[in-house]
Amino acid sequence: MTDYGVVTEPTSIRFERLLPGPITRIWSYLTDSEKRGQWFSSGPIEPKVGGKAEHVFNNGKLSKHDDPPPEKYADHAGEVRSEGRVLTYDPPYALAYTFGGDMEVRFELTSQGDKVLLVLTHTRLTSYDMLTRIAGGWHTHLDILADRLSGREPPAFWKTHARMEAEYQARIPRA
């Protein structure tokens, strides 16, 4: 298993991460606003299909190493909000919701001994630039989740994201 996302079709990317369990712990980091806010975004997710999924991002504050976004993401300085709808809510195994309009994000959890396999699939990406941007973002957010679960302070989000986005641009050929 690699930490890098794999393009499964031109509009989809899939990540797999083996994380310290138990599964209910990982589920809480997906669904509890305060815990999710430590690695991705805060905001309520209604625990039912059709419920509202709100995301309140503040990426520069995800670590003690506060950093401003690069110029191309200047509109992401401070708090950024996004809303979607819950498509799947099956605790503690699967969560899916719409994201940023028509995109979909799906999390699947499987216990593997004292670890949990998290599979994240982001679909309906509309362009190559969005694919590499989202890939860099999820890679960075999942690294922060792994750090949080292991009791480590994560590095600065935006510096890491810029590096990861560049790596995905080098790894994923333009169609």
Image (spheres, grey):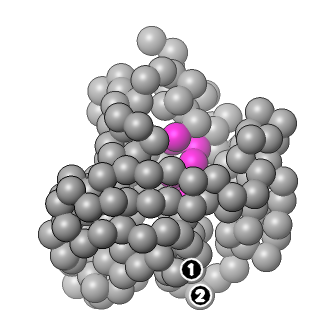
Horizontal and vertical percent position of residue 118: 32, 65
| Secondary structure mainly formed by the magenta segment | helix
Q: Which label was assigned to residue 57?
A: none
Q: Secondary structure at mark 1?
A: helix
Q: Which label was assigned to residue 151?
A: 2
Horizontal and vertical percent position of residue 111: 21, 77
Residue at position x 25%, y 72% from top?
47
Residue at position x 69%, y 79% from top?
153
Nearest the viewer among 157 and 166 is 157
In the rendered image, the quadrant that contains the N terminus is: bottom left
Q: Which label was assigned to residue 148?
A: 1
Query: In the image, is residue 133 part of the stretch drawn in magenta?
Result: no
Identify residue type, mark 2: Gly
Horizontal and vertical percent position of residue 12: 34, 34
Q: Is residue 66 visible?
A: yes
Q: Is residue 9 left or right of residue 50?
A: right
Residue at position x 53%, y 29% from top?
130
For disc 2, the neighbor class at 10 Å (few under 14, some 14 to 19, many from 20) is few
Please report the bounds of the magenta region as a residue range: 134-141
